[in-house]
Amino acid sequence: MSIEKQNFETQAIRTQTEKTQFLEHSTPMYLTSGFVFEDSEEMRASFAEEKDRNLYSRFSNPNTTEFVDKICKLEGAEDGYAFATGMAAVFSTFAALLNAGDHIVSARSVFGSTHALFTKYFPKWNIETSYFQVDDIAKAESLIKSNTKIIYAESPTNPGVDVLDLEALGKIAKKHNVLLVIDNCFATPYLQNPIKFGADLVIHSATKLIDGQGRVLGGVTVGKKELIREVYLFSRNTGPALSPFNAWILSKSLETLAVRVDRHCENALKLAEYLEAHPKVNWVKYPFLKSHPQYEVAKKQMKSGGNIVAFEVQGGVTGGRTFFDSIKMCSLSANLGDTRTIVTHPASTTHSKLAIEDKLAVGITNGMVRCSVGLEHIDDVIADIEHALDKI
Ligand SMILES: *Cc1c(COP(=O)(O)O)cnc(C)c1O
């Protein structure tokens, strides 16, 4: 045992900002927009960055710093910056690192709003994106051009729960001297650390399992110090900072991440196994089911399978509608990673803006259900889903 390098759970609990004069046990909320200086010399030195201290909460705040420090430790990252939402983290990271005319190589299956950045907004700045299928990593290499700056992927993907071989992507990125940026939202730092496999930067929507209770939005980017410096400078000027209040909540949430995610995964695997045997279900995808196409990769890079189960009910649009309208307890919502189990219809909600062929390319069919398995007793979740499947 080492007291130098603490374990995940301990770091998630014991990483705290310095206590104040009151010696509080739990970190207080620092709801202040600014900070004062002793004198003109301190003011000058602080703005010249000769002194490392809080100046203004758009730049840093004790609560956001505590949250970022924890994520850095849990991901094995050098530095980070916290954002108001996951999408602010995704956008600001790209915007900080890319120039007009640069090129991105991305997995085809990415979060709906990230897809919108690639297709609607980045082309305005002449930033083009080329795509590879999640199971064709070799294609990623063939898409790299002289102006490629970033390889981007999520694993597991939203909503298809596909798994990408992070080690293989890391090798390609290194060989071609491009950055590897991974959206690690579905896995959380507890199940997977992309930096170990060669990622330069890791992004989280903290809104999901990191908050874990469906209360606040947040995002974070962590990774190499010199890259985070660019992300920080861009963000300190453009203003997507996480609020101290939300940072306080998210840092508290991290204290229980490991125990929560353990139970989420246990419940999700039970539901996935149940669905796999159900006659009204065409297919089920869960990273730790042997039938998952990338099961071996998932086992290699993840501690457990996560809390998202994707499946297709029989009967296409009608089957899907009957299923959703017959659900009694689980929530019909677009969020995920809550204590409450949520069922989502990606085709008509989170991914509705995708063209039909783009939906099919990432496995989104009309009968597809994305289930974010919560922390209720799993027997009650299964009973609710069973009742809805019986109605089809
Ligand atoms: C939700 C989500 C995001 C965006 O996060 P917000 O906090 O909603 O802005 C990005 N990536 C993935 C994989 C997500 O699930």
Image (cartoon, helix red, strand yellow):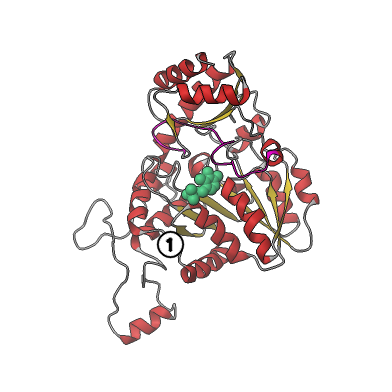
Task: State yes or no: residue 191 in magenta.
Answer: no
Please indicate whether residue 186 sits to the left or right of residue 177 in the image: left
Q: At which x and y percent is residue 332?
A: 45, 32
Residues 205 and 321: in front is 321
Q: Is residue 1 above or below residue 236?
A: above
Which residue appears at 47% of the width and 26% of the height? 266
Mark 1: secondary structure = loop
Identify the image quadrant of the C terminus.
Answer: top right
Q: Is residue 202 above or below residue 349?
A: below
Please indicate whether residue 357 sits to the left or right of residue 253 in the image: right
Q: At which x and y percent is residue 307?
A: 49, 32
Q: At which x and y percent is residue 26?
A: 26, 51
Q: At which x and y percent is residue 62?
A: 34, 62
Q: Is residue 42 above or below residue 188?
A: below
Identify the image quadrant of the N terminus.
Answer: top left
Looking at numbered disc 1 in the image, what kind of residue is underneath it? Ala
Which residue appears at 60% of the width and 45% of the height? 353
Please, which residue is most extreme toward the front here?
318
Which residue appears at 30% of the width and 72% of the height? 35
Q: Which residues are magenta?
A: 336-356
Residue count near mark 1 (Cα–Cα under 10 Å), binned few <14, some 14–19, many ≥20: many
Q: Which residue is mark 1?
A: 241
Please indicate whether residue 55 sits to the left or right of residue 271 in the image: left
Please indicate whether residue 308 sits to the left or right of residue 24 in the image: right
Which residue appears at 59% of the width and 31% of the height? 287
